[in-house]
Amino acid sequence: MLPINIKLLCNNPDNDSFRKYEKIFSQRDTDTQIRDHEISCLKTLVGCLNLPVESWEGFYYSYSIPQIGKEFDLLRVCEGCVLNIELKSERIPIEEIEKQLLRNKYYLHHMREQTHIYSCIANNGEIQEVYWLDGEVLKTIDASTLGRVIVESLPSYMDDLNKLFKPSTYLVSPINNPERFIGRRYFLTHQQEEIKEKVLGMIDLRRHAHPILNGKAGSGKTLLIYDIAKRIANSGKIAVIIHVGIKDAGHFELERLIPNFKVIAIKNWHEIEDIDFEVIFIDESQRLMGYQLKGINKVCKERNKVCMFCLDPQQLLNRGEVRAGVAKFLSIQRNSFALTEKIRTNKELASFVKALFNLPKDASSVKYRNIHVEFARTEDEVRRLLCYFKDKGYEYISHTPSRLVSHNTLDSFSSPRTSHKVIGQEFDKVVVIVDNDFYYTERGELTGVQHPCPDYMYRGLLFQELTRARDEVCIIVYNNESLYKKIISILNNETFAFEDVTADTEESPSSIVEQLSFE
């Protein structure tokens, strides 16, 4: 998105022309809904300050940070500072203004050493109030002071603003960034805040309930339930998170630094029977076995406590999880909340992963600048490529191996980070290896041969690995030319045609879950 001259924008004779002019000259990637009262408010600001036309050069209007969705009304990037002006067409509680400006400061202070942040209430042809965030304190100033700031803060950056915002700077993983999480160096989205308040309301009722949080990879599920758990723990009550995976160093660090905050690996779920907990959160609930779900719910019901389930039905790693059918069972329950905003996975990565697992029939215009695919014919070439990308900051995640059977040469490229060990975690850059164990079906679906551990699914393991990435992905294709060519075609936005083949029958959920009831 490019900056524009706000004065020239406001010279448009009607709102429809205003919108068209803004879209043309800002060159924004996505459409934005600019409402009539927002246009009126901006025109009031420009008209009342009555500054020279050149003073309004270099402003980004109605900018939204990619992935995160945080919006700013007016931004200007200067030599040593960034100027932000928020516009209001009516008065709102001063606490809300202060909260917004402090949040803006959090997002903007990464760009420049100083932040000049203001909020202006303008309607009915006049500026009614101007607020200035002085450090952490909100102050009232007159409109002429704001005018001088605009005149004196000359723009120094006039390129695409997206280049200055790296979403991973603001995205916090409680497991991978425990210090930032504990220090509250993050913000929840509006949707996350709404769900948080509803869940806390259920907990305050002090009776058995089972809220369910549903969302795809990157929607912020883990951050939200860990945030709620921290809130409970800080109130002096014990919050337990059952991690349906392997405990990581970050889990132990959270337990050490937050009193009353406990994380239990799913294999030790019986430990809850000896804990005087207030609430239980189950992360990656879709991977539960039926007996675990029944057992945990039984304990919570007997104690009249809340048990919150957090799941992504697509993240299934083995056939046992599919047969158990817990994901399907939880997805149809009441008290279900859906996180629809994707705050981690950017559009490019999401589009690529979707196309990789199901070859596209329709053309795409996505530019895959952060997806890398490399071909290696020998093990030595694979090792050299791995070293190269690891030196560039990529985290290598290997497929979880069988504990009993050595399968193929990929076992020699094992990593401390495997598909199962990174459940619930996230990294800026991820590199993976695929070989002849992967192929496309007649329907264009990426699948794999049978894993040495018959219960594991290569397709599920790879999906888990790739969806851990925030920014960039690299796939090293080891001696599988057919697969490599198809991935290159995806990156080239080519389309594929398939015969209409009947899909295989899905394994049905086990009777233990079909008989389960929360009532």
Image: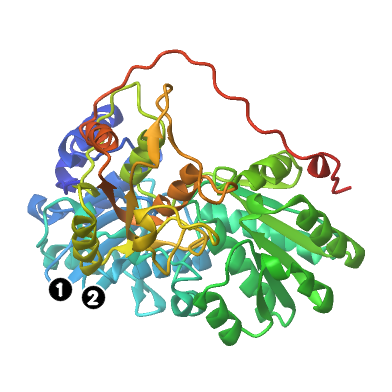
Residue positioned 44% across, 53% down in the render = 407
Q: Please say which color scheme the image uses.
A: rainbow
* Quarter of the rendering containing residue 239: bottom right
Name the kind of residue labelled 2 in the image.
Answer: Gln
What is the tally of numbered marks visible in this picture? Answer: 2
Which residue carries the number 2 mark? 114
Tag 1 secondary structure = loop
Tag 2 secondary structure = strand
Seen in the picture, residue 442 relative to 223 is either above or below; the reply is: above
Q: Nearer the viewer, residue 271 or 107?
A: 271
Residue 208: give x, y in percent of width and height: 85, 59
Seen in the picture, residue 142 relative to 346 is either above or below; the reply is: below
Q: CA distance from mark 2 to mark 1?
A: 6 Å
* Residue 69 seen in the current view: no
Seen in the picture, residue 58 relative to 97 is either above or below; the reply is: above
* Residue 268 seen in the current view: yes
Residue 51: give x, y in percent of width and height: 15, 55
Mark sitting on residue 80: 1
Q: Are marks 2 and 1 in contact (CB under 8 Å)?
A: yes
Q: Residues within 10 Å of mark 2 (few under 14, many from 20)?
A: some
In the displayed structure, does residue 268 sit left or right of residue 352?
right
Residue positioned 21% across, 40% down in the render = 10
Residue positioned 39% across, 75% down in the render = 139
